[in-house]
Image (spheres, helix red, strand yellow):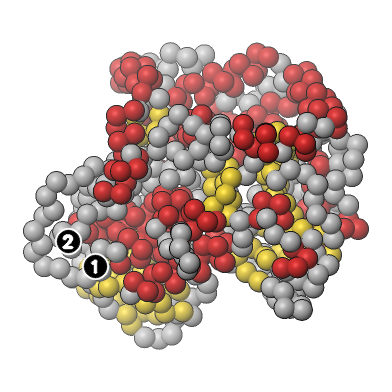
């Protein structure tokens, strides 16, 4: 199947929503090589031989997405999962915390948020029905109505701002306070002093370069530079490095600005900015009603994963838990079977490896690599840690419901108070009645020294991690003169159970991180082995980030590849492109000529 890539299609429902039409008619559909944009097939092909059995190894986001698309198109699907369904998106009950008829305290791998430029994940949610009517998207995906920006530096103060016009109206009483206005004034003045205007202008110019670069330059030049190199952070002010080039990027897209490719960071920056305008039909977001930043209004499993699995089971998907693949065997240039950890061998028509790179890499046997040498690049991909901790508090936060970005904190912390946006009385719903709010925090950098112990998180004990995260978040959030975070309010806390000490620290769920030049090493969903497919956030996608969105998109591409190989008459799953301003297309064409002539971008000075 070398170099064969199926053409993705648009369902009637997607056409009615105008997603593909908006991309084609109102803007530029930006897709990467070997990731095709949606287009409808007028006449489905006549099937030659319809082999229908699919084994999906891995029940995370990509595996469930592939199963969803395939079961709705008449395939027989079995999902094999050794641990937990939902993968890194799942939530869990904190053991031993339920009392008096209440639910257990809600723990999670890390709080989930859904930027307005996400398309595949909300589309899947909209197709998951709920008991009593409605669907997951309409009932459980809600807008975050404000944002709080805190800075890990003296002289700055945490500032809250509305995330939409309606959010500003709804929470005017919490936003237009003397304290918040004073903090905004202090922070704004210091920001202008610390980052000279010419540096701000230069940063904007670098984003304009990405926006007007042709696809060839993005892949041939910007893909091979880190974001920090691209924005020329060296020699700029400390604040430019800390808050523009570094921490702001990390807070928005959960990527490392010092190693991530400039192409990836620049493109997601464009997607976030254009989705926020509300002028792009295919992005379900806007400045008036919000949607730039969305979350679930309940624990992830309760709101999304459990209903999803129930729907898939009702459609006929079979789930085999507690058993994972240990090796794929080859015969005649095809996969002949999957040896499982239980000792049995699974044989099927189509094999889908929907597992993270730390599990997939060791399975790349010499026979597999001989059949598809490009798979060797998977072993060159890098992963890192990015998990969460929840602090369960005695008092409900009086801040507006907001996503907290603690810019510049050594461990790159972001957070969210959950009681207000969830619209729940924690004391009556969870735990033993003492907990009235939960501050859920994502720890994105496990390699930098902290402020209490001078050690990176990977060298700390469980208790040290909890104290260090609270100390870093407190230093940023309490810098405005009011103690927003108080250690005496903590009832208990819960660190992601994937972090273990036995006796040294380990992480069961590392995350692939984008690095400059890594695109060439990332696999496509279809391989040169005609019955073997790959899903996961490490697969080449349009979103091009290790995210739920990327994993979901890859699951759809797996389904489309199987549809093409099986000569099924089913209409392919929709794969949404990114959208960029159509008025920039002439500038991209001019840049294409310059790139082919070996000339730099016209704005690259």
| Residue 591 seen in the current view | no
- Viewer-proximal residue among 361 and 587: 587
Tell me the residue at 85%/49% (across/down): 485
- Viewer-proximal residue among 422 and 241: 422
Q: CA distance from mark 2 to mark 1?
A: 9 Å
Q: How many marks?
A: 2
Q: Residues within 10 Å of mark 1 (few under 14, many from 20)?
A: some
| Quadrant of the image occupied by residue 203 | top right
Q: Secondary structure at mark 2?
A: loop
Q: Name the residue beneath numbered marker 2.
A: 568
Q: Nearer the viewer, mark 2 or mark 1?
A: 1
- Residue 155, percent from left and from top: 85, 29
Q: Is residue 546 above or below residue 279?
A: below
Q: Is residue 95 above or below residue 193?
A: below
- Residue 600, percent from left and from top: 42, 17
Q: Secondary structure at mark 1?
A: loop
Q: Is residue 159 above or below residue 592?
A: below
Q: Name the residue beneath numbered marker 1.
A: 74
- Residue 315, percent from left and from top: 34, 71
Tell me the residue at 40%/34% (across/down): 281
């Amino acid at each position: 199947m070398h170099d064969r890539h199926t053409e993705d299609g648009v369902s009637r429902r997607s056409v009615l929503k105008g997603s593909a039409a908006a991309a084609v008619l109102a803007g530029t559909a930006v897709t990467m090589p070997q990731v095709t944009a949606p287009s409808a097939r007028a006449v489905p092909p006549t099937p030659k031989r319809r082999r229908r059995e699919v084994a999906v190894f891995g029940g995370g986001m990509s595996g469930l997405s592939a199963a969803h698309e395939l079961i709705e198109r008449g395939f027989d699907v079995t999902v094999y999962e050794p641990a937990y369904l939902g993968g890194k998106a799942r939530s869990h009950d904190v053991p031993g915390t339920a009392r008096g008829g209440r639910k257990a305290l809600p723990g999670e791998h890390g709080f989930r948020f859904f930027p307005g430029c996400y398309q595949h994940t909300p589309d899947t949610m909209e197709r998951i029905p709920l008991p009593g009517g409605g669907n997951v998207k309409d009932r459980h995906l809600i807008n975050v109505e404000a944002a709080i920006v805190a800075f890990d530096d003296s002289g700055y103060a945490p500032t809250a701002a509305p995330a939409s016009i309606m959010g500003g109206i709804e929470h005017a009483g919490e936003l237009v306070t003397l304290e918040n206005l004073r903090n905004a004034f202090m922070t704004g003045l210091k920001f202008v002093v610390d980052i000279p205007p010419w540096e701000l202008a230069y940063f904007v110019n670098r984003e304009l370069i990405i926006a007007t670069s042709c696809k060839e330059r993005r892949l041939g030049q910007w893909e091979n530079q880190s974001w920090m190199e691209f924005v020329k952070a060296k020699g700029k002010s400390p604040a430019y490095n800390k808050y523009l080039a570094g921490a702001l990027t990390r807070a928005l897209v959960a990527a490392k600005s010092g190693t991530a490719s400039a192409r990836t960071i620049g493109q997601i920056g464009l997607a976030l900015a254009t989705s926020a305008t509300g002028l792009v039909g295919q992005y379900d977001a806007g400045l008036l009603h919000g949607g730039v930043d969305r979350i679930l209004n309940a624990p992830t499993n309760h709101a999304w994963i459990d209903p999803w699995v129930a729907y898939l089971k009702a459609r006929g998907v079979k789930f085999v838990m507690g058993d994972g693949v240990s090796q794929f065997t080859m015969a005649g240039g095809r996969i002949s079977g999957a040896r499982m950890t239980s000792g049995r061998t699974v044989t099927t028509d189509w094999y889908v490896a929907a597992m993270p790179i730390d599990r997939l890499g060791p399975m790349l046997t010499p026979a597999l690599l001989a059949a598809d040498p490009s798979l060797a690049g998977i072993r060159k991909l890098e992963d890192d840690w990015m998990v969460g901790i929840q602090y369960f508090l005695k008092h409900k936060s009086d801040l507006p419901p907001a996503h907290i970005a603690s810019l510049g904190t050594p461990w790159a912390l972001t957070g969210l108070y959950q009681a207000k946006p969830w619209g729940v009385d924690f004391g009556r719903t969870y735990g033993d009645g003492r907990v009235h709010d939960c501050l859920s925090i994502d720890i994105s950098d496990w390699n930098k020294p902290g402020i209490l112990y001078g050690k990176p998180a990977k060298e700390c004990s469980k208790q040290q991690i909890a104290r260090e995260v609270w100390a870093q978040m407190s230093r940023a959030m309490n810098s405005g003169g009011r103690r927003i975070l108080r250690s005496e309010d903590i009832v208990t806390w819960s660190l992601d159970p994937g972090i273990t000490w036995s006796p040294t620290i380990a992480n069961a769920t590392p995350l692939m991180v984008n690095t400059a030049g890594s695109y060439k090493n990332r696999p496509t969903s279809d391989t040169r082995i005609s019955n073997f497919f790959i899903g996961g956030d490490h697969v080449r996608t349009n979103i091009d980030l290790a995210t739920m969105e990327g994993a979901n998109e890859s699951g759809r591409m797996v389904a489309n590849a199987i549809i093409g190989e099986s000569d099924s008459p089913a209409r392919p799953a929709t794969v949404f492109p990114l959208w960029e301003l159509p008025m920039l297309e002439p500038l991209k064409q001019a840049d294409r000529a310059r790139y082919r002539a070996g000339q730099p971008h016209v704005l690259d000075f």
